[in-house]
Image: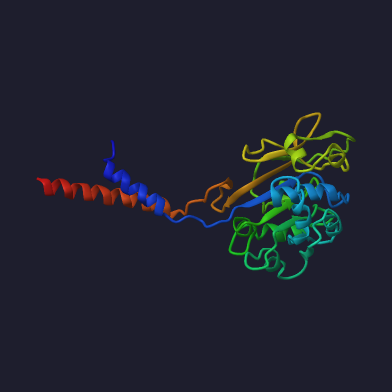
Amino acid sequence: MKLPKLVLAIAGLALVAAPSVSFAQGNIFITGHDVDDHGNSAYFAAGLDYLAYGAAASGAQIAGRSALKVGYLANSNGGTGSIAAGGYSNVTFIDLDTAGWQTTALNTGAGKFDILVIGTGADYVFAAGSTALNSFAVGATSFATYFNAGGSLFVNSEQGLGQTFYNFVPSFGVASTSSISDVGAFTPTAAGLAIGLTNTIVDMDITHTTFSGVSGAFTIFETYDPTGAAVAIGLRNAVIDTGGGGFVPGGAVPEPSTYGMIGAAVLVGAAMLRRRKSARA
């Protein structure tokens, strides 16, 4: 059945006016390396530059690294030194063992962290830390709210413990947790080179995780040579659909009430059309 143009027009206006989740769009960088374990400050700088600028920092951006507020989340501080050495010197250790850490880390108001770095699993984020992180996946004070308010996440390897160890990050593909200790077996992609990764940087430490079946919305920055599996990936200007839709590039996620509004608009439009026909008769 074809809907009259008047009904379609009213439904269209309802869709435009319908509420949606407000957001500023967040950015995420995920690596299978344990960058903090190996003190790889150049790798940190490349991933953080991607989150902050979308490409390798240059000129004034390099000087601006120190102005960005970075938080390093873990049970043990193994990363702030390497982060600072990469130029992001305004970095704070946020201890997951401290009560109220989430209020500090996930604040979306004045003084919020521009970037949150999640420490490597096992060595710096312990089992209790994993539980703590995962318990704040969604909600008023959560990683989803922080991300959707324009926050950025740099996630180190869960170090073979499985993707669910960092379950506060929505699924984006399939993680393989077999450690790869080959020397010289990793290669930056063209996108990786553009953010500052080089062969020397990616070969500095082994990887504990590779990714396959990665969502096409993500950019792949580094691969494992023998298989072509992704080692580092990222996504900019996205939101997390708290209804279970995972990462959504670009636009807002509609509220559930949106579809009800459209249906109501169609009914109203149909009623108006009937009245107009009756008036003509």
Q: Residue at x 17, y 48 (%)?
A: 276
Q: Residue at x 32, y 51 (%)?
A: 265
Image vertical order of residue 2 relative to residue 95, above or below: above
Give the image quarter of residue 141.
Answer: bottom right
Which of the pair 241/128 is nearer the observer? 241
User: In this view of the protein, can residue 231 be seen by the observer?
Assistant: no
Q: Pick whichever, 142 or 49, lies toward us.
A: 49
Q: Position of residue 30 (x, y in %)?
A: 73, 46
Quadrant assignment for the N terminus: top left
Above/below status of 84 relative to 176:
below
Residue farthest to the top, as pictured: 226
Is 32 drawn above or below residue 117 in the view shown? above
Q: Is residue 267 above or below residue 183?
A: below
How are the colours assigned in the image? Answer: rainbow
Q: Quadrant of the C terminus?
A: top left
Q: Position of residue 54 (x, y in %)?
A: 69, 46
Q: Position of residue 14 (x, y in %)?
A: 37, 52
User: At 41% from the left edge and 51% from the top edge, which residue is drawn?
Assistant: 16
- Give the side of residue 107 with respect to residue 31, left or right: left
Q: Name the outermost residue toward the bottom.
A: 99
**Which residue is the extreme one toward the right?**
183
Residue 67 image point, x, y percent:
75, 61
Residue 87 or residue 47, whichever sits in front: 87
- Name of the residue lying farthest toward the front: 59
Disc tally is 0
